[in-house]
Image (cartoon, rainbow, N blue to C red):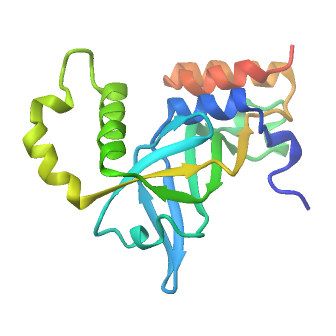
Amino acid sequence: MIYPPPHYSDDDSTYTNRIIDTYGFPLLTSSNVDGPLATHLPMVREGEYLYGHLAASNPMCEFLGTSMIFLAAFHGPHDYISASLYDKPEASVPTWDYTAVHVHGTTKLLTAEQSVERMAELTEKYEPQDAWAMEDAASYAGRLFPHILYFEMRMDRVRGIRKLSQNKNAATQARIIAELRAKGNDDLADEIDRIRKT
């Protein structure tokens, strides 16, 4: 059995890069002898690489720059879909529609100079215009850098998943989109609208 089912897979870079670039706060996972390790962190994509940083005290840091394969799981919009929206609710069950991208890859530690550049890029991406810049707290930030490890992660394998009621007919998809918009989940409604039947 193939999982996820082929009709829920979308490895096209137009889709996967959009999810990564829009929802840049993945769950990064690896493991050690004690079991799985996981950290939530911001990551920025540039070409075929992801850039992120971890507190030096994080146990995952001992595997940065090794042959360890990491997984960064990016979560896009998602929501509960009621069976009441289907043609035959009495013969249906609810589900959860979602978008996600899983990136597997190895890592490399960055130099101090590269680390400063990457941190500046991260803040520039998310800071409101003219709100704050690295230079505003250069002395304080400089004291933090020895306690933070910056790394790049090569995107060796990218799996895009979008479970968006593809198995439903056009009328049902329209009802789902309308319900999501009524709930204020326009992001997921837009994702379904991109692939819905006409």
From the viewer's perspective, tell me whether residue 75 is left or right of residue 44: right
Say which residue appears at 63% left-offset and 50% top-offset: 103
Which corner quadrant holds the C terminus? top right
Question: In this picture, is 15 found above or below 141?
Answer: above
Q: How many numbered callouts?
A: 0
| Image position, residue 116 (x, y; %) | 29, 41
From the viewer's perspective, tell me whether residue 22 is left or right of residue 135: right
From the viewer's perspective, tell me whether residue 103 is left or right of residue 194: left
Camera-side residue: 149 or 198? 149
| Image position, residue 178 (x, y; %) | 64, 18
Say which residue appears at 66% left-offset and 38% top-offset: 82
Say which residue appears at 57% left-offset and 43% top-offset: 49
Question: In this picture, is 80 found above or below 166?
Answer: below
From the viewer's perspective, tell me whether residue 189 is left or right of residue 168: left
Camera-side residue: 39 or 180? 39
| Image position, residue 22 (x, y; %) | 51, 29
Camera-side residue: 113 or 124? 113
Say which residue appears at 80% left-offset and 52% top-offset: 4
Which corner quadrant holds the N terminus? bottom right
Of all residues shown, which one is farthest toward the bottom? 33
Of all residues shown, which one is farthest toward the right? 1
